[in-house]
Amino acid sequence: MQTLPSSQMVQFLDLPIELLPLILSNLPKPHHLASACLVNKAFHIFAVPNLYERASIYAWHRDGKRKVIQLFNTLAECPHLAKYVRRLDIRDFPKAFTLTGFGSLDMVLTGLRNCVNLRACTWTRDGSLNSGILTALQASGMLRELEINGRSEDNYDPDLLHGFTHLTRISIIMPSGPVVDRLRIWMALTGNTLQNLTLICKVTSSIITDSVLEGLAPHLVKLRYLYLTGCPRVSHRGVWAIISHNHAGLIGLGLEGMSPRFDMRKLASQCIAAGALSQLKFITLTVHPQLHLNAWMNDVSFLLSKSPLENFHIYSTGAFYEAPSTDHFWSQLVATHGNRLIRFSVHRMLISLRAIDEICKRCPALQQLYIVIEPDSLISLGKSLSKARSLREIHINYPLEAQTDVIPVISTLDATSIIRNCNSTLTQFGFNARVWQVSRVVEKDPNGSIRINPKLYPYESPDIPEPFLVVRT
């Protein structure tokens, strides 16, 4: 093959301008996009919309409160930039805003009103949401997703929620009584478009009950995703009320921290008889410490037996379960759904190497694997992972009990030795509280041969890794 002289080599600027948006889409960090905006006019045109498309402020961000003021100052003073904002994630925000000296509430409201193309908003810090913010959010006729803190007392008028009538996704964290009292009317107003409903309560909360869900059920006929967390007054009765009224067919279902009276066998029998979960692809369940584990696992297998399951997530809220008591369940799950499973996620329930090997071998589509193993099993794990041909993410946890004797960290060298066994599809590796990105580097051996080796880099994505999410969807 003829080699072009250096003067004729294709340069970056010779690439078609149409490729630039695709190139910029691979820059995950905002400051990378900000730098790209300064390259030249063409870069500025394509990078600015990407930079402002998603604005996120998290509690762990350094100087988060200062950054949130800078953000809203920009949105208020630069409507030509605010129009690019599609998703707004505000998880840290000063309370009593006008009294802190951080800035003017009017500035925040103006910034929100300027986000005329806003499609999704998250505002979750307790005590930071007020009536003015809710009213400003309603100015965007494009808003389709809303995630808010549900404690309205002394914060906002819960009747304002009725103004959001075209939402496809609603998530309410720690709803108070006044908010729950408005849910039935709200669901009636937006139920024609609502596809995803999430209610997250404290495990000691009694605010969401079977009766509440029964009242909502007639208005949730088009729901595709239902996630309930920390609802100890909700049993199979309330869940069946929503499922039985549903016409669209649930695709995702999360039942975390439900009532000890929850009869999984009863729900399974009702669903199978009605063919109610024939479209279910996502399931999240918790194991209650008072359960008879073997019977419960058999009931879950029955519940899912007719579903085209792709994503499975389960964890224990109390006792830690050892491998012998769960191995048969994993085997049943793989036998029924192995050909379709994309995500297999388990926390606080030990998985044996034999079970992991079976999962990796019999789930050809598996992309995400989150497991708990004994420290002694780590050295042998790579052999099983090598059988997962499509694996993109692996996260390993040690049992909490084991952490009293074993330091819950792993060196980069040891982590690299594990991922060397994995397929080249792997892009993320996690161990306990740490997550890395996995990339590939081309290296030349002393003898001149070329090798492509995996290498670990700091996690850069703005998305929270799945093992650290409160609600998995």
Image: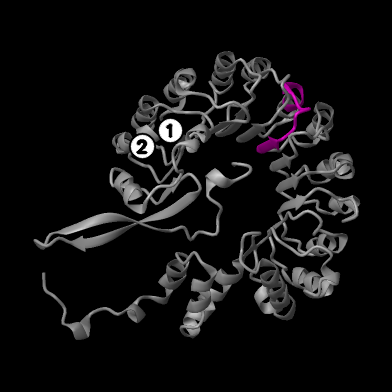
Q: Nearer the viewer, residue 97 or 24?
A: 97
Q: Is 61 covered by the magenta stretch? A: no
Report which residue position mark 2 lands on: 378
Q: Residue at x 30, y 80 (%)?
A: 11
> Where residue 262 sits: x, y (%)?
71, 21
The x, y position of residue 214, in whole percent, is 81, 28
Circle 1 crowding by C-alpha within 10 Å: few under 14, some 14–19, many from 20: many
Residue linked to disc 1: 373
In magenta segment, residue 235: yes
Quadrant (top left, top right, bottom left, bottom right) of the N terminus: bottom left
Quadrant into which the C terminus falls = top right
Relative image position of residue 65 (x, y in whole percent): 70, 68
Q: Which residues make up the magenta segment? A: 224-239
Give the alpha-carbon distance from disc 1 to disc 2, as whole Å: 7 Å
Residue ID at (51%, 67%): 29
Left/right placement of residue 369 relative to residue 272 reads left
10 Å neighbourhood of mark 2: few (<14), some, or many (≥20)?
Answer: some
Question: At 86% across and 70% down in the image, what residue appears?
Answer: 99
Q: Secondary structure at mark 1?
A: loop
Q: Mark 2 falls on what kind of element?
A: helix
Q: Residue furthest front?
A: 405
Say left or right for 408 vs 71.
left
Out of 166 and 211, give the one closest to the viewer.
211
